[in-house]
Image: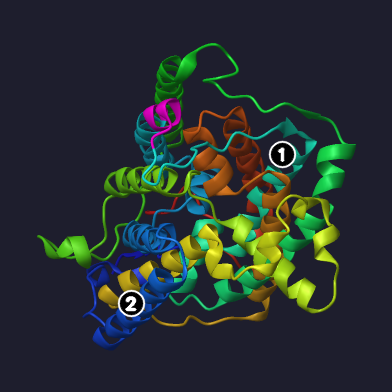
Amino acid sequence: MATHVQPINEVKDPVKRQDAKLNNPQTPHIIGGLVVSAILLVYLLFTQEAVQPLLLVIGILLGYTLFHARFGFTSAFRRLASVGNGQALRAHMLMLAVAVTLFAPILAFGLSFFGGEVSGYVSPVGISLLVGAFLFGIGMQLGGGCASGTLYAVGGGRSVMFVTLLFFIIGSTVGAYHLPFWTEELPSFEAVSLATSTGLGYGGAWALSIILFGVIAWITLIIERRKKAPKMAPLPSTSGWKRIFRGSWPLFAAAIVLAVLNALTLMTRGTPWGVTSAFALWGSKVAQFFGIDVASWGYWQGNVEALNASIFTDSTTVLNLGVILGAFLASAAGGLFKFSKMNLKNVAAAIIGGLLMGYGARLAFGCNIGAYFGGIASFSLHGYIWGILALGGTFVALYLRPLFGLSVPKPKDSFC
């Protein structure tokens, strides 16, 4: 009987074709997830500003969407680099097209729910970006997921991703400590915005962005046809209205939802969705607890108060917790939550991958979410450069993954 690969994040267990059907909902898990979400929401409502509970809800929706579509960045880059499949990357282009369409008026007119300033992620281009994005590209292929992928895989119960997350935090903390060297001692240029640095304005930058996304999508189609790339494997699903809550979503639907949620994040907290700055904060707080003078690091100059405040005052932390909870609820709704097996090889890959992603994200001013998604949506040149260098790191990682027992799609596979 023919088998195919069921791409639940980075899991590559062969499953029977007729098994691409959802299990029964894990009702106790769903109830538990809802209770924890409600408790955290109430806590935020009574202890924090109104922004934080709203961000928790957005985070839950982000996690739910990511898991329901298995919307990956790591697997998208790997499929393109290994066998030329660009289906997921075209979904990225749709996501970015919707995002820039929403971000342009928000940034141009300073639209905000709470009346604060609004700014995108526009970061410098320099050695730190080039090295950081390249390291991140290698790391996400070894670690089994990107920044958002790590969070939603943890929510889905993939055990080895807890190891990835731990070392992601460690790498991000070390990267924060080293960041002044990379940004001040090595060559770096000013940040470049396609909207404000070029004279195009947000309207012109939007048009240019749409053209670029179209060209990239077209290139992926050419690559697919020339390489006769295998298709992405179908996901377990249901039908009708139940699919909204239980079944897998098409990539294009998730792409649109993620773009809308990122725009809502921008209007809620004044900056786009991000992930890894919270990891640096968590790690720095632990280091400070053990007596390390974290406040003296250049990374924390101008924001020392964050080290002494509750983590629940940090909006990125709240979003991250929401993503984990949302992914947990989605996996339980699909009857898919369970802890997976670990072995020495995948743990070693998780350690190395987590360290490289954490360190790389700090050097590159963000991860696949903050630099790639948020950067490009904010019309920043550094977002495009991040994507190119991360893809370069992916090509290198294709040769490293088999050393850790991790699979790489093959041209003769039925599915990738």
Q: Which mark is residue 158?
A: none
* For discs 2 and 1, the disc positioned in front in the rendered view: 2
* The quarter of the displayed image where residue 357 is located: bottom right
Residue for point 70% across, 72% down: 348
Query: How far apart, in angstroms, are the residues tagged by discs 2 and 1?
Result: 39 Å
Label 1, secondary structure: give it: helix
Residues shaded magenta: 104-111
Depth check: give the residue in front, 46 or 121.
Answer: 46
Give the prevailing secondary structure in the magenta stretch.
Answer: helix
Task: Tell me which amino acid carries mark 2.
Answer: Ala
Q: Which residue is mark 1?
A: 129
Q: Is residue 176 left or right of residue 226?
A: right
Residue for point 46% across, 36% down: 227
Q: Quadrant of the N terminus?
A: bottom left
Q: Which mark is residue 38?
A: 2
* The quarter of the displayed image where residue 95 is located: top left
